[in-house]
Image (cartoon, helix red, strand yellow):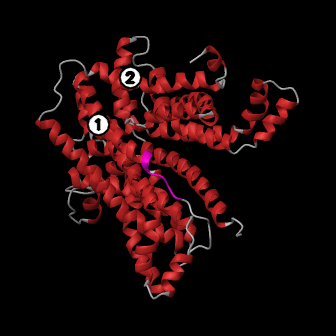
Amino acid sequence: MTLGSLLRWPVSYPLALIVALMALVPVGVLFGLASDDVQLFDAHNLKVLTNTLLLMVFTVLGAILIGVPLALLTAYAQMPGRRLWLILLAAPLAIPSYIGAFTLYAAFGRGGEIENLLGLPVPAMDGLMGATIVMILYSYPFVMLTTRASLLSLDASLVNAARTLGMSLGASLWRVVLPRVVTGIAAGGLLVALYTLSDFGTPAIMRLDTFTRVIFVEYNAFGLSQAAMLSLQLLVIVGLVLFLESRVRGSRERPGRHLTLWPGRGQQFAIVLSVVPILVLAIALPLAVFGIWLVREGSEGFEFSYAWNSAHASFLAAIFAVILAIPVAHAAIAGRAGRLMERMTYFGFGVPGIVMGTALVYVGLQLPFLYQTLGLLVLAYVLRFLPLAVGSVRSTAEGLDPSLVKAARVLGASPREAFQRVTLPLTVRGMVAGAALVFLEAMRELPATLMLGPTGFETLATYLWRVYEAGYFGRAAIPGLLLVLMSALGLALMLSGERRAEIDVTETPQS
């Protein structure tokens, strides 16, 4: 590569390359840390691997079995309060899975809240079955939303033709509609798989030995080398899922008339009966348990400095993530090399928080001025959630009219001036949206905060974890409800984007 070709690189490339290399640092640290004399594989590792894979497979299958029918329902069925049903069915995304696991673990079993309140003995919810149920309840919206997006892009003419030829509605949906949205279902299933692999709180609360739980145990026992080896084994599985996700490509059809289903009263009643148990377990029961705890113990033990700590660290992460996302997003638009750099930053989002924490703990040990500082925690948040900001900034920048920048250049503006006075102001909306998403995800992050937070630095997520470990369940009410509220804001952002996409599809002029 000649000096001239380097000089012709877009200005955003050098900064984007630095950010991309930063995203790969944790993986390199893990390889160096795991090179010590540690066990690569043993009988316990086999059990951990089996539990992790079984939890992932069962969760994906359950999420598909629930999410696909609900996608058909919300996309096509004309029911009273149709928009409200979509919001309610997507609402489990507003509750971090570890909060659901905490409340369901406390509600079921001997001496649980259900037995105390109603006097009804119910089985305990723990182990592989309990973790699977919790993960399904809080991950099926991924499948529902990706499948629904695919369904909304379909033309109903093929279904109408099949119905005209005598095929039943169920058969036409099975043989005509679902094969055309396989990529949407697969994309949602792979998101569920990544979510399950990276989750720490649910397996830990349900007492199931998966990679994330065992890594945290090793870290607490000062076994950093073994934790790093387990982290690399988990990353192999995550890398395989990410590879499969990269191979999933959606096929878009020319938008046409939507399929519309008008269920009768009896069918509507049956639909409601099948949906209500999901909403009760995923939303109503956790909120009811928090309400009971709030009435019983109030705000005892809780300090609002925990909420300030969460907001402070998350706000810093959001600001720095957007600053780093700007050159990466514009590099991705500029050319193929920039797209590769962008893809490298996405690797951080696939790294579970427990793995990121393990790597950065070692970095902090080698750099004492960073160890147990707010800066190291913010760095972990930025590396984890940078792709959220990159995607938001890039999607906004790609929608800009290039003639505006060209006009500025014709009028004598330098490339830097055109970027500062034209491009940057027009991408503010994407920057704000990306910052909001990073802020909300950082508020929810549990394992990285547990491992990297400064001494005495308690956040909403870590305080909730401490009261769980201490058995003071009632004190989890306020932090749990605050986390649900903040997560609901993130869900509102996502659904507003989904609503705009739906309008674009449904209101496209027909040729």
Q: Residues within 10 Å of mark 2 (few under 14, many from 20)?
A: many
Q: Which amino acid is tagged 1?
A: Leu
> Which numbered disc, 1 or 2, marks the residue that appears first in the sequence?
1
Q: Give the vertical position of 482 relative to 24 (above or below).
A: below
Residues rendered magenta in the picture: 246-251
Residue at 62% over, 28% down: 327
Disc number at residue 258? none
User: Looking at the image, how many numbered discs can be counted on the residues?
Assistant: 2
Disc number at residue 234? 1
Q: Nearer the viewer, residue 199 or 30?
A: 30
Where does the image place residue 211, in percent across and percent down from the top left?
Answer: 25, 38
| Whole-number angstrom distance, CA of label 1 to CA of label 2 | 17 Å
Specify the farthest residue to the right: 411
Q: Which amino acid is tagged 2?
A: Leu
Q: From the viewer's perspective, tell me whether residue 265 is left or right of residue 273.
A: right
Residue at 57% over, 55% down: 495
Q: Quadrant of residue 252?
A: bottom right
Most common SS among magenta residues: loop
Asked if one can make out residue 150 in the rendered structure from this viewpoint, the answer is yes
Circle 2 sits on which residue? 360
Secondary structure under the numbered disc 2 in the rendered image: helix
